[in-house]
């Protein structure tokens, strides 16, 4: 019985993969890559309460920097201070829109971590807020995901 092309490809790939994995340098590289991917996954899917922010912004600074295409720590955890414009729940996720003092046309959309309970904080429009989250980028507004409170909350 003749083998088809796919069977030859699978055999070829398997033989080359096993040959590469017998080299200890490749095994070490694969282990480091696996650890790196596990660490990255934890930032995006788990509680970032204990992760130190790599940058600190006021809401106005972050919005203006991103509107002006300045470099920013995309996919990094950042801390932002501003004022609550509104809170809502969309697609089962609690969101907080943060505004600055001067920029009233653009906002920071913070999709809160799954463990966040609004009832614990009693957030309302106009409250000062200090929040951190994973900076995803800027479309018309700034997007932060997996956000948690930085334990500071004061009235305006």
Image: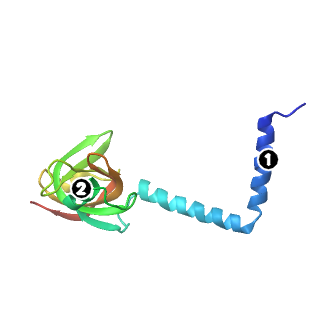
Q: Position of residue 145 (x, y in %)?
A: 34, 52
Q: Nearer the viewer, residue 87 or 134?
A: 134
Position of 62 compared to 26: left or right?
A: left
- Residue toward you, 75 or 118: 75
Which residue is disc 2 drawn over? 63
Q: Is residue 149 left or right of residue 153?
A: right
Which sits earlier in the primary sequence, circle 2 or circle 1?
1
Q: Which residue is mark 1?
A: 12
* Any part of residue 90 in sight: yes
Which residue is painted at 26% across and 53% down in the image? 67
- The crowding category of the residue bearing disc 2, from other C-alpha atoms within 10 Å (few below 14, some 14 to 19, many at least 20), is many
Give the spatial CA distance, label 2 vs label 1.
52 Å
Residue 84 image point, x, y percent: 17, 53
Tell me if I can see residue 113 in this picture.
no
Q: Residue at x 32, y 62 (%)?
A: 78
Instruction: Please identify the quarter of the rendering in which residue 48 is found.
Output: bottom left
Which residue is at 20% across, 49% downward?
A: 106
Residue 3: x %, y % from top left: 85, 34
Quadrant where the N terminus is found in the figure: top right
Residue under the point 35% across and 63% down: 49
């Amino acid at each position: 019985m003749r083998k088809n092309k796919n069977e030859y490809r699978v055999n070829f790939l398997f033989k080359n993969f096993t040959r590469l994995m017998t080299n200890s340098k490749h095994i070490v590289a694969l282990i480091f890559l696996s650890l790196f991917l596990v660490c990255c996954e934890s930032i995006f899917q788990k509680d970032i309460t204990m992760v130190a922010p790599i940058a600190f912004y006021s809401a106005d600074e972050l919005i203006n920097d991103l509107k002006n295409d300045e470099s920013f720590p995309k996919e990094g955890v950042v801390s932002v201070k501003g004022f609550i414009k509104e809170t809502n729940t969309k697609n089962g996720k609690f969101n907080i829109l943060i505004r600055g003092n001067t920029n009233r046309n653009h906002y920071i959309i913070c999709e809160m971590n799954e463990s966040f309970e609004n009832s614990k904080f009693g957030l309302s429009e106009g409250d000062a807020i200090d929040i951190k989250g994973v900076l995803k980028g800027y479309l018309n507004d700034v997007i932060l995901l997996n956000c948690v409170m930085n334990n500071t909350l004061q009235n305006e």
